[in-house]
Image (cartoon, helix red, strand yellow):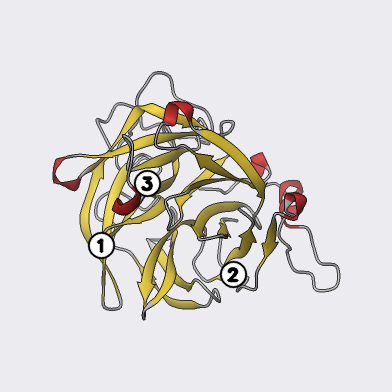
Amino acid sequence: MTRFLLVAVLVIACGKDKERGEPTPAAPEDDRCQPLPFADAAPVPEASGAGWMTLDGKPALLVISDSGNGGAYAIVDAETGESRETGRLPLGTAGEDLEGLSARGELLYAITSSGWILGYRRKAGGFDLAKGPYPLGPLDLPDKGGMGDKPPEGTGMVCGQRATNCGRNYEGLCLVDAAHEKGPCIGFAASKADGHLYCVVEQEGGKLAVTYEPRIAITKPGALADCAFDDAGQLYVGSNLFDMAQVSRVDGWDNPATAKVTKIAPLGIGFPETLAARGDVIYRMSDTGGAPSLMNKFRCRR
């Protein structure tokens, strides 16, 4: 959740088109990524995560909102960025600080900043809460929040269900589809507090859990914003403005101890949090504390 942006930081992030007065995306490094035509915003406030789904036979992104917005969502057409549907997700007892979203099988899984999981199933005109809320492990961290940009002491991983910005302060969730599953992890939870991806495993009955090891170091504390698998099982990570909106590729993620993080380009708009990928296309969406949420789309050379 981002409510403390500085004017100077926003200027660095967005820039201004002097004639049109509109925000422009950060310039990619070495022309490796080119902006594509896309709607410049979605009506959902404070976009914090996005997961792939199919709407009317076409790929779409379910974009979710974070704390203070009652589970608000928008479904965005992957080609045009048109917002096709808006609504509210059922939240159960876990509060509303949804920070990451990823599809796996028939469900879309959301993670809260404190480390609780909610699994959603599509129904006509909305979504059902099909699993959870449940914690990704033992409640072994204090609920005290703050800015959530400093790692906690020890190896604890999960706070209380209604706490926010505590402990690892999870900002993203990325789960690989079964066809590309390999290694000990089926995905990762992205920690803003310490800049690491933590291994997510699947337990008996399909329940997800997070482990302290293995993990992948990505960036400095306070900067990691999201992670995403594309449809070929390639893993990407995205930072916020405190790491200049950097998007990177993570090779060898199936062996986290030797995984290699390669920078692609600084990509994003506003205060970029959400990341999604499909083929050679990367999507970013911004949480600047209100609605609408700015967004953009890039094609990046492999």
Among the 4 quarters of the image, the one containing residue 106: bottom left
- Is residue 74 in sight in this rendering? no
CA gap between label 1 and label 3 equals: 20 Å
The residue depicted at 65 percent of the width and 40 percent of the height is 242
Judging depth in this view, the residue of 1 and 125 nearest the camera is: 125
Residue placed under numbered mark 3 in the picture: 112
Q: Residues within 10 Å of mark 1 (few under 14, many from 20)?
A: few
- At mark 2, the secondary structure is strand
The residue depicted at 56 percent of the width and 55 percent of the height is 287
- At mark 1, the secondary structure is loop
Label of residue 41 in the image: 2
CA gap between label 3 and label 2 equals: 23 Å
Q: Residues within 10 Å of mark 2 (few under 14, many from 20)?
A: some
Q: Position of residue 109 (x, y in %)?
A: 32, 54
- Is residue 33 in sight in this rendering? yes
292 to 181, vertically: above or below = below
Judging depth in this view, the residue of 15 and 28 nearest the camera is: 28
